[in-house]
Amino acid sequence: MARNTSLYFRVVEGRNLPAKDVSGSSDPYCIVKVDNEIVARTATVWRNLNPFWGEEYTLHLPMGFHNLAFYVMDEDTIGHDDVIGKISLCREYISSHPKGIDSWINLTRVDPDEEVQGEIYLELHVVDNQQRRMLHCHVLEARDLAPRDISGTSDPFTRVFCNNQTLETSIIKKTRFPHWDEVLEFDLDLEADEVSESSEVSVVSVEVWDWDMVGKNDFLGRVEVSLDTIQKFPATKGWFRLLPFGNAEEDTGGKLGALRLTVRLCEDRILPSMYYQPLVELLADSIVSPTEEESITPLAMLEEVSSVESRQEVAMKLVKIFLGQGLAVPFLDYVNMREVTRTTDPNTLFRSNSLASKSMEQFMKVVGMPYLHGVLKPVINQIFEEKRYIELDPCKIDLNRSRKISFKGSLSEDQVRESSLELLKGYLSDIMDAIIGSVDQCPPVMRVAFKQLHKRVEDQFPEPANEDVKYVAISGYLFLRFFAPAILTPKLFNLRDHHADTRTSRSLLLLAKTVQSIGNLGLQLGHGKEQWMAPLHPFILQSISRVRDFLDQLIDVDSENVSEAQPRTLFHPSVTIKEGYLHKRKAEGMGLVTRFTFRKRYFWLSSETLSYSKSPDWQVRSSIPIQRICAVERVDENAFQQAHMMQIMTKDNEGQLHTMYIQCKNVNELNQWLSAIRKASIYNERMLPSCHPGAFRNGRWTCCLQSDRAVRGCSRTHSAVTLGDWSDPLDPDAEAQMVYRQLLLGRDKLRKTYLEFSDPGTAPEREERSCDISAKQERSPSFQDRRMAAAARLLDVIQDLERAHQAFERREREEGPNHSHHP
């Protein structure tokens, strides 16, 4: 049984940060760490003590985690960046907020003694030796220790305390992955009387220190195990997580400022597929075998009991479940038909955050993101690179800023607006030409979904006065919920690595507003408060007929010959999931490490190959089959004296291991590439359980100092740790588990509905229900019975899954502690 841990966090904004620069301000950014590993870095907000970031991430951590930390830094162009403060949240604290954390939290000071990381492998057991009891403490190795020296390593040794005795291991120089393999023995009968009189429980304390020739040694972490535990479980051994001294973090009362954070944790046990099959089949029955009464299907009941806050997540999981079943288009047709038939005013169609609107929105992101990138990326890149000053609102025009766009000094307000209008029309022409010319690029499955939506709306609103409704229904999704949001915030759609600066952000806002108006087919022109947008109205009106023609072409598709994605992948093998320039190490085994050993290469990643060449248009490409990848991991900075590096380990046909070292330009790019390649290779067989985070140079590994090149890796691999986004592979079991969890939360509501119809109640109640039922299209007399039966089936499936979870949990408890100190 697998475990699935998803950690969502959003770094919203900061307030009242201290000034770190001589100018009286700071240039803040945030680093986010999970168990001391950097997983994200926000953009820098220059010269601002109240910065806004709004950056969000989802991490999939199947092995779980212990701690989530946010560090606020001040970027300096010269020297090291300053640490402003940190917020540290343990997993237990986050778990205690099932609905998530969304609040302002004060920053605390960073204490070096608290910044510990890594694990140590110990074997502890008590033996009787000639009528004396002895504790054998076998200190084997440690991994991922904190770097305390300027070289990016440490010189670790272990100090063990037991029964008023202290013993130390040897010092191992320049490593974060030391191998001691030393046994320290303690006499447990020594001063036994004193120990027995003590009210404290006797413990074995194992501390790891970094030895320094000059000055005091640096603390690296410690582990405490009670003697009672060691005697109770004779084979007390395994990896123990290193912990700080335990000094409580001091809340500085807001003197270091605060961060507004949103954090949500989802921890699930994923059962084997067979347990979810009844639930998936029940949901599929709503579509495959539709009933006359749309409100008595399990899907309809799921929408009833799920909260508005969870609807987006439910929609995403349902889309992926039905993609895996090859039923995404019928599913969307079903939820859209429910929405259309319940709508009486066409102006309100799909305007709410219903299951239908959220499902279509998530469906477009899942299957249409490569399409979106192909359409918008060139013009978005141009806008970012040109950084033109654009403004139409008279209240916001800054004539001082306009000097930079003219060699003739300041422009008048009219000249700024005229210049801005021409620039906007130029960008808009490029955007609209790209969209309207993209019919063949649009995924066929999206086109079929739009075709069916068009038909449902046309059948529901056939009147000539509602001629545009069938177009607005499609453009409302495609323009208002897909293209316009991507133009407004390109980073959230992976179109750019960083947020736009203030000037570019304003240009994108004006463009997104206009594209939104075009998507509305100009129906709201002149009704808004922003009359200063009027100069763009002629362009909007000219675009409307082109949009109608585009939508007609888009739905002119053969529904029968469109096959949906296979269960394990969302993309055609030839689709490029990620691409860009990276630096590849020239060769393995070189003694010298210089910047010349790295070559700039353009990489492409698809679901079948990772390929690279000298440039995007270079004819000759080298390719690595994805199925040969057996590990994708970070590389220690001291291995090559280079930051932001990863290694891709592959096996050839003879079973020989090969390692390619790649350098990325920043930590976010590194994490994105790690995640993308891991997702592409997630179903590979024979993935490596461990690897070396260093490099083999000068006859030994730089990480653990072992001289055998083929020795087992000193660090565990993280092949299933990924960033959540649109390119996630389908995982039907994890998706079904989330749907089950929502149904479990709504079970009481479902029971109430079920019992309400099974209990005759009082005469007035029966009469009221009778009126309600007759009002709903004069349903047949068996409606109540069928609704009760459908609810009962759903409740039975929920109960079966709950029992299966309980059985697995009981089995885990019966198997004992299973070394609960393990990571």
Image (tube, rainbow, N blue to C red):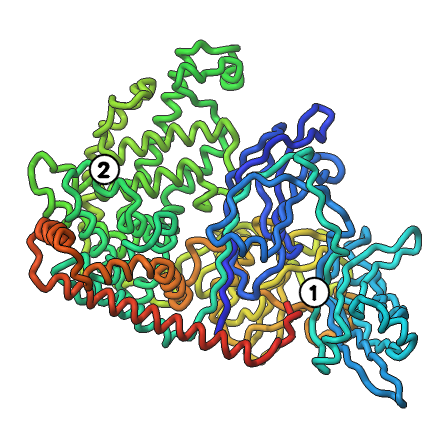
Crowding at label 1, few (<14), some or many (≥20) Cα neighbours within 10 Å? many
Mark 2 belongs to which amino acid?
Val
Give me the residue at 45% from left, 73% from top.
806
Q: Quadrant of residue 493?
A: top left
With respect to residue 522, does 593 lie above or below? below
Q: Nearer the viewer, residue 510 or 244?
A: 244
Q: Nearer the viewer, residue 595 or 424?
A: 424
Mark 1 belongs to which amino acid?
Arg
- The circle drawn on residue 241 is 1
How many numbered marks are there?
2
- Looking at the image, residue 723 sits to the left or right of residue 639; the answer is left
Give me the residue at 30% from left, 63% from top.
322
Outermost front residue: 762
Crowding at label 2, few (<14), some or many (≥20) Cα neighbours within 10 Å? some
The residue identified by callout 2 is 547
Q: Is residue 665 visible?
A: no
Kindly state the secondary structure of the residue where label 1 is placed.
strand
Residue 153: x %, y % from top left: 78, 57
- Looking at the image, residue 104 sits to the left or right of residue 178; the answer is left
**Quadrant into which the C terminus falls:** bottom right
Residue 111: x %, y % from top left: 76, 47
Give me the residue at 68% from left, 31% from top.
18
Kindly state the secondary structure of the residue where label 2 is placed.
helix
With respect to residue 120, does 477 lie above or below? above
- Looking at the image, residue 793 sits to the left or right of residue 58; the answer is left
Residue 310: x %, y % from top left: 38, 51
Residue 193: x %, y % from top left: 90, 75
